[in-house]
Image: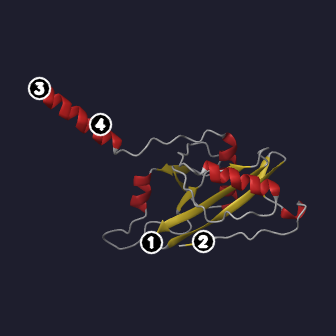
Amino acid sequence: MLRNLLLLSITLALSAQSKKEPELNIIEDAEAYNVYSAILDMEKPKGELLIADTTVPFNQCLDPHSDEPVDAAIQDYKKANQNQWHVGYHFVSTQPYKLLSRKEANTLLQRDRRTGDWSLSPYNGIHRFSAVGFSANKTIAFVEMDVVCGGLCGHGHPYILQKKDGKWERYDFRWTKRTQVPVICSWAY
């Protein structure tokens, strides 16, 4: 009887363990955090930054851009975003920021039960990033980011960045062999 009880306990423990969310790897590439930080600098959000602690594979804007380095970064992006990743406290920002777990983010994205108001706005929403895709020499980066604020409030788009003089900035398509500027999509909620 004691043996059966022990086996039942072990079975229940293993069953509960298998229902947990899978353990995600943490992004450890400093260059990815430099890209994320550059995007936040471009966006210039106000107040404390709220950042989701898990990447989101958006897959919204992945058409080839007729530019080999950018296309290579998009291919790497597709590979990197086959899995979700945890984001760490490695952003380079003069603004204070907080990483939010899924549970914390979901709580903030709900209406206040008493007032019916949303706790976030488009100016202080939760920033969610994809994993970063890089060109082979890590001078071009492709990443997508959105800002969500609850209900149908939010916006997002991809970023194509290039590393110039040690800093990440928007990619300048004027210097490519082909002058076709890619169509960059965006989305709103």
The crowd level at tag 1 (other Cα within 10 Å; few <14, some 14-19, many 20+) is few
* Residue at numbered disc 3: 2
- Amino acid type, residue under disc 4 in the picture: Leu
Looking at the image, which residue is at 69% across and 50% down? 76
Nearest-to-viewer mark from 4 and 2: 4
- Residue 4's spot in the image, x, y percent? 14, 30
Looking at the image, which residue is at 73% across and 52% down? 73
Residue 183 lies in what quarter of the image? bottom right
Quarter of the image that includes the N terminus: top left
Q: State which tag comes first along the sequence, 4 or 2.
A: 4
* Residue at numbered disc 1: 151
Classify mark 4: helix, strand or loop.
helix
* Residue at numbered disc 4: 14
- Measured in 3D between alpha carbons, the distance from the residue under mark 4 to the one under mark 3, in whole angstroms, is 18 Å
- Amino acid type, residue under disc 1 in the picture: Gly
Q: State which tag comes first along the sequence, 1 or 4.
A: 4
- Amino acid type, residue under disc 2 in the picture: Trp
Q: Are marks 4 and 3 in contact (CB under 8 Å)?
A: no
Residue 182 appears left or right of 80: right
- Report whether residue 38 is seen: no
- Residue 139's spot in the image, x, y percent? 79, 48
Q: Are marks 1 and 2 in contact (CB under 8 Å)?
A: no
* Residue at numbered disc 2: 187
Q: Are marks 1 and 4 in contact (CB under 8 Å)?
A: no
- Amino acid type, residue under disc 3 in the picture: Leu
Q: Is residue 8 above or below residue 136?
A: above
- Residue 59's spot in the image, x, y percent? 60, 61
